Amino acid sequence: MVRRTNVVLRRIYPIAPRDLEQAGTVSTHVRRELLALGMNPDVVRRASVVCFEGEMNMVLYSQGGRIILLVKEDRVEILFSDHGPGIADIDLASQPGYSTAPDWARELGFGAGLGINNMEKNSDLFKIRSRVGEGTVVRATILVGVPFF
Amino acid sequence: MKLRDIAELLDAQFITGEDQADREVTSAFAADLLSDVLAMVKDEGVLLITGMTTPQVVRVAEVMNMGAVLFVRGKLPTASTVAYASGTGIPLLATRRIMFETCGALYQEGLDPARRKHFPVDHGTPDERGS
């Protein structure tokens, strides 16, 4: 039987494509929300990094979408969903060093091809589903270990 | 190493956060590639040495809980980025020295390199690994 845990906090953030002035702000909000809940610094840092990588990917490559932060008693879940263009080969896209980033993204210091791998490494559970032409959904979960409330 | 000593050593100016001149940074990491900062820096309270001045530099420093950002090569972030940084409490410094000289001087003074995670690309290129 799956044990249901209460949702402690839920936040929904819209992400606009190519909005470089704002890119990264959702992650800083997420970080502050988690710090305000008094969560373990390691969990806060990992969740913030996962969120930042995902947010930058959405801003740089997607046609926009949203990030949902769900804090439960035993975990932090971050859900990313976008409106396309979708990832044709997820295994390839997850390989460190593989990148399809255009020059303008690289000039901003991103697009080194480490993002998805870094999200995966900082998460306890990580899942990507994608359909070309429709969009990509990522669920990243960071386990808190013991309930912190 | 204290930010005050770093500023003195490199003729660096505080752009914001001068009130935190006594803050200690644990170690340093130098890069213009923010992807690498996000993927490789293990420690917190690290000094980020960079020539990149986009708003994302400060946001990366914030999510990574870094100690301060030092801009090299005489580059300065925009006013809105500075204002944002003041809100986060992350001190920003700027020096006209190039990155090589900056790192060399700090290393010579005994500032440690940031401990790094296992580099994701330590074992060859994606082409080699994919086969």
Image: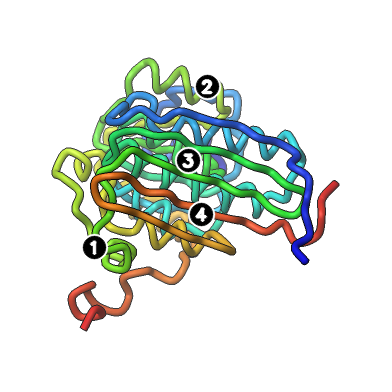
Tag 3 near tag 4, CB within 8 Å: no
Q: Nearer the viewer, mark 2 or mark 4?
A: 2
Q: Nearer the viewer, mark 1 or mark 3?
A: 1
Q: Residues within 10 Å of mark 1 (few under 14, many from 20)?
A: some
Q: Residues within 10 Å of mark 4 (few under 14, many from 20)?
A: many
At horizontal 56% and vertical 63% (from top left) the residue drawn is A125
Q: Are labels 1 and 2 assigned to the same chain?
A: no
Which residue is denoted by mark 4 in the rendering?
B27
Task: Indicate which disc, 2 or 4, sits on the residue closer to the N terminus.
Answer: 4
Identify the element where label 4 is drawn: loop
Task: Indicate which disc, 3 or 4, sits on the residue closer to the N terminus.
Answer: 4
Q: Is residue A55 above or below residue A17?
A: below
Quarter occupied by residue B43: bottom right
Q: Which amino acid, by three-letter code, is at mark 2?
A: Ser
Q: Which amino acid, by three-letter code, is at mark 4?
A: Ser
Q: Kindly tell me whether residue B101 is visible in this rendering.
A: no
Identify the element where label 2 is drawn: helix
Find residue A98 and name its label.
Answer: 1
Find residue B86 and name its label.
Answer: 2
Toward the viewer: B10 or A125?
A125
Residue B121: where, in percent of width, then height? Answer: 31, 70
Toward the viewer: A48 or A78?
A78
**Mark-to-mark CA distance, 2 and 4:** 22 Å
Q: Chain of mark 2?
A: B
